[in-house]
Image (cartoon, rainbow, N blue to C red):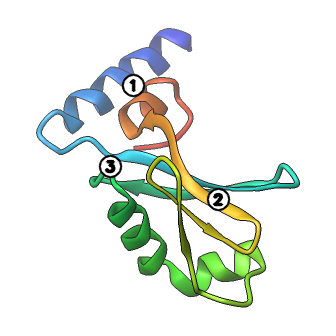
Amino acid sequence: REIEMEALAAIRIENLKNYPTRYEVVASHKDGRRIFMGYTKRKSRDGIASLVASKGPENMQRMGLLSERMFNAPAGALMVEGWTIGFTGRTQREAIQFGEIPW
């Protein structure tokens, strides 16, 4: 079974070779909560903002936000009402490779 999982991961990674790398974005609250936001091709604050905007109402509800007004934070992140939205340092390829997300 483990060999099947490794083979499947290898196939998934091979399928991604012709696509741009996507970077994992999460929202972290100062109380310790973390919400997976998605993946973006753009490793910049603009990429994060675009991802958040594309899933606006859904993310606002999941985070319990009252306002969409975001502020720039250090290291290419965004801040809003106690949440910091930024990159985890992982890529979509890595998540697939470790079997954490389906293809």
How far apart marks 2 and 1 lie (CA) works out to 31 Å
In the rendered image, the vertical position of residue 9 relative to residue 41, given as above or below: above
Question: Which mark, residue 84?
Answer: 2
Is label 2 in a helix, a strand or a loop? strand
Tag 2 and tag 1, C-beta contact below 8 Å = no
Looking at the rendered structure, the kind of residue marked 1 is Ala
Q: Which residue is more in the foreground, 41 or 10? A: 41
How crowded pointer 3 is (Cα within 10 Å; few <14, some 14-19, many 20+) is rated as some
| Cα–Cα gap, marks 3 and 2 | 16 Å
Label drawn at residue 43: 3
Q: Quadrant of residue 50?
A: bottom left
Percent across and percent down for residue 24 are 46, 46
Of all residues, the one furthest to the left in this rendering is: 18
Badge 1: residue crowd in 10 Å (few <14, some 14–19, many ≥20): many
- Mark number for residue 9? 1
Up/down of 57 relative to 35, above or below: below
* Badge 1 element: helix
Could you classify mark 2 by the number of other residues whose Cα lies within 10 Å: few (under 14), some (14-19), or many (20 or more)? Answer: many
Lower sequence index among marks 3 and 2? 3
Lower sequence index among marks 2 and 1: 1
Residue appearing at x 32%, y 21% in the figure:
10
Judged from the image, the secondary structure of the residue bearing numbered disc 3 is: loop
81 over 79 or under it: above or below = below
| Position of residue 8 measured from the top left corner of the image (x, y, whole percent) | 38, 25
- Relative side of 16 to 3, left or right: left
| Residue at screen point 26% across, 41% down | 21
Please identify the quadrant where the C terminus is shown. top left
Q: What's the amino acid at mark 2?
A: Thr
Asked if residue 93 lies left or right of residue 15, the reply is right
Q: Residue 101: x percent and y percent?
A: 52, 41
Q: Quadrant of the N terminus?
A: top right
